[in-house]
Image (cartoon, rainbow, N blue to C red):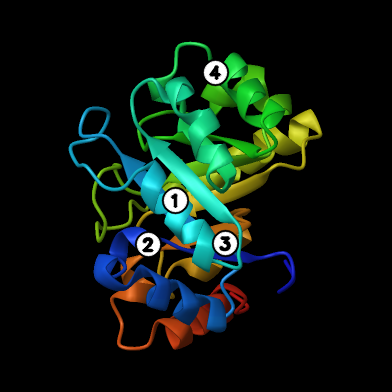
Amino acid sequence: MTDAALQIAPSVLSADFAALGRDVADVERGGADLIHVDVMDGHFVPNITIGIPVVKALRRVATRPLDVHLMIEQPDRYIEAFVRNGAAMVSVHVEAVSHLHRTLALIRELGAKAGAVLNPSTPAAALEDVVRDLDFVVVMAVNPGFGGQTFIPNTIDKVRRVRALLRAAGVSAAIEVDGGVDPGNAAVLVAAGADILVAGQSIFGTPDAAQATRALRAAALRQL
């Protein structure tokens, strides 16, 4: 993978909510390609985070596309509002929707890129019948709901399985890995097939988020 192909998506879940504009500017200065926004409702996952008003505010200050990850029940009710208020990419959990094909079509019809998210216990095969409707796949490397969790090692093999599924279908959808990503596992994830790395604590939990963003990219592109 080339530097141009790899995308780094800092997750504002780990940022300072009292200074989101500053933190977003810091990671953009460090070369962030996307700004990852985790939306949680306290039902699908055991946590409540941010919603449409914060996405709207981020859109005013961010110069990179907003990658909005909906960890919520009944996401179809809110997708239009998120896209209207700045989401360039919207991902929904396979486990949260009854009619995934219809939900992905809705996201695309609204003009955003459509992604499906796999929890750690959900197999790659769950995507087989919607693979051609995907712009990207999010592989969770932790159980969703909280930042700062420990990376699940089996994720690496799962990324390989998702890549094989996409390749067999002739689909060029990107693979995004979310949860526990840091400079220690970035290179092996890219080697397995990851295109987008979401990182929260390993970027915003450091004294210099700009430098941490650059360091994550450098580590991801390091030869194994």
Going by the picture, which residue comes out furthest to the top?
98
State left or right for residue 183 relative to residue 100. Answer: left
**Residue identified by numbered label 1:** 55
Residue 214's x, y, as percent? Answer: 53, 83
Q: Name which of mark 1 and mark 3 comes first in the sequence.
A: 3
Which numbered mark, 1 or 3, is in the foreground of this view? 1
Q: Cα distance, mark 2 to mark 3?
A: 11 Å
Which numbered mark, 2 or 1, is in the foreground of this view? 1
- Give the residue type at disc 3: Leu
Residue 176's x, y, as percent? Answer: 55, 50
Q: Name which of mark 2 and mark 3 comes first in the sequence.
A: 2
**Residue identified by numbered label 4:** 100
Quarter placement of the N terminus: bottom right
Secondary structure beneath dot 1 equals helix
Residue 144's x, y, as percent? Answer: 30, 42
- Give the residue type at disc 1: Val
In the rendered view, tell whether residue 81 sits above or below residue 126.
below
Residue 55's x, y, as percent? Answer: 44, 51
**Residue identified by numbered label 2:** 12
Secondary structure beneath dot 3 equals loop
In the rendered view, tell whether residue 139 sits above or below residue 218.
above
Local packing at callout 2 (Cα closer than 10 Å; few below 14, some 14-19, many 20+) is many
Q: Name which of mark 1 and mark 4 comes first in the sequence.
A: 1
